Amino acid sequence: MDFNSFGLHPDLLRGVAELGFTRPTPIQEQALPAGLAGRDLLAAAQTGSGKTAAFLLPILQRLMGKPRGKTRALVLTPTRELAAQIHEHLEALAKYTPLTGAAVFGGVGMGPQETAFRRGADVIIATPGRLLDHFQNAYAKLDALEVLVLDEADRMLDMGFLPDIRRVLRHLPTQRQTLFFSATMPAPIVELSRDMLRSPEAINIERKQAPAKGVAQALYPVSEELKAHLFLELLKRGEIGNVIVFTRTKHRANRLSDFLEKHGVPNARIHGNRSQAQRTEALAGFKSGRFRVLVATDIVARGIDVEALEHVVNFDVPHLPEDYIHRVGRTARAEATGDAYTFVSPEEEKDLRAIERQVGKQIPRRIVEGFDYRKKPAERFEVPIQERIAEIRARKAEERARANAKAE
Ligand code: AMP
């Protein structure tokens, strides 16, 4: 399935393509048809699933061609960072349309936000507290509102925002489309969703994934030759979101990056052979969300600091336990939750045992149901160094022979 099948406006498809999205994620595949049809949604989906585009695209599609100057969509989100991130995502998706958004959150001046209300920004992305502050003023009317998104509802609950949400709702038209997103569905969230939604389409993407706090570590036993395929499978299933994947060597980093490229996964690579400019660009692209995957070698592991990183994948078991611990520490900063997955081939079991001793526990092992562990890949993943050198020599010899032939 690709993005062309949803009937999206060509100008939105251009934005999607420019972000490097080739295939919809599972949440997008399921949420887009109902969202575009104007239905309410109740979606259990985590950050990293692609949920932002899943709610922004139906909003933008609905607003295309409508008279402007009125705020027709509101996205409620728990934190400033998320509001800023969603705003950025919206500007990227809407790049080839006249539609614009405005982020409304605390800690910055009210003035520019007041202007956004007065000129009727098409979409307002707001945290509840600051929005309520604006509602005290006559300029902050959302009478023309057509779509409301509640993002990360369970986090709103954790942060004590539910009373604020109910207060915000009193300022909004009741005739509207509501898109409700939450990673988990505790009872108060279910109750809130019942009050807010009308015969919603229910989507549950990550039912199996427990709401882990802190870093969840897991091992994926897999043969050397199938590691790249397994990685691709986990990406496709949405089981890994934005991810740094570490390989043992530069060659392996290049091979993995090429493999992902071939399978339509936007990615960047950083390792010792890349210039500082290339590294900076790769990291910036990853942080901004342009690439979902950053392929890196051990060398650069310590220089990377990415906020809200969801996953680290050790494509190879690190030789040193310290490296493992350091890398796993990249995820789950602050209150963000992160996962650290390690692919283990039979040859790497020994290094793994040293790590488990250091961590002081056995790391759980996971088998990916439905993945063909006996598959014989058409191509070898790693070309042995001797063969690579022989190939380079042969190429050089050929070039020399050609140059000589020309000179004669
Ligand atoms: P979200 O869960 O919306 O925060 O998205 C997580 C990350 O996935 C963001 O960096 C998005 O840019 C990226 N993303 C969303 N949809 C897709 C897609 N269809 N293909 C590739 N990357 C995507």
Image (cartoon, rainbow, N blue to C red):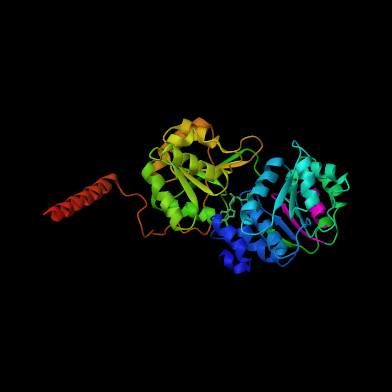
* Nearer to the camera, 356 or 205: 205
Q: Quadrant of residue 259?
A: bottom left
Q: Quadrant of residue 64?
A: bottom right
Percent x, y of residue 355: 47, 34
Percent x, y of residue 249: 38, 41
Percent x, y of residue 295: 46, 45
| Quadrant where the image shows the N terminus | bottom right
Q: Is residue 373 above or below residue 33?
A: above
* Nearer to the camera, 372 or 402: 402
| Quadrant where the image shows the C terminus | bottom left
Q: Is residue 184 magenta?
A: yes
Total labels: the figure holds 0
* Nearer to the camera, 370 or 104: 104
Percent x, y of residue 367: 51, 52
> Range of the magenta residues?
176-194
Q: Is residue 348 magenta?
A: no
Question: In the image, is 361 to the left or to the right of 91?
Answer: left
Question: In the image, is 163 to the left or to the right of 289?
Answer: right
Identify which residue is drawn at 29% across, 45% down. 385
Residue occupying the far left of the picture: 408
Question: In the image, is 361 to the left or to the right of 249?
Answer: right
- Residue 254 visible in the shown view: yes
Question: In the image, is 362 to the left or to the right of 254?
Answer: right
- Residue 24 visible in the shown view: no
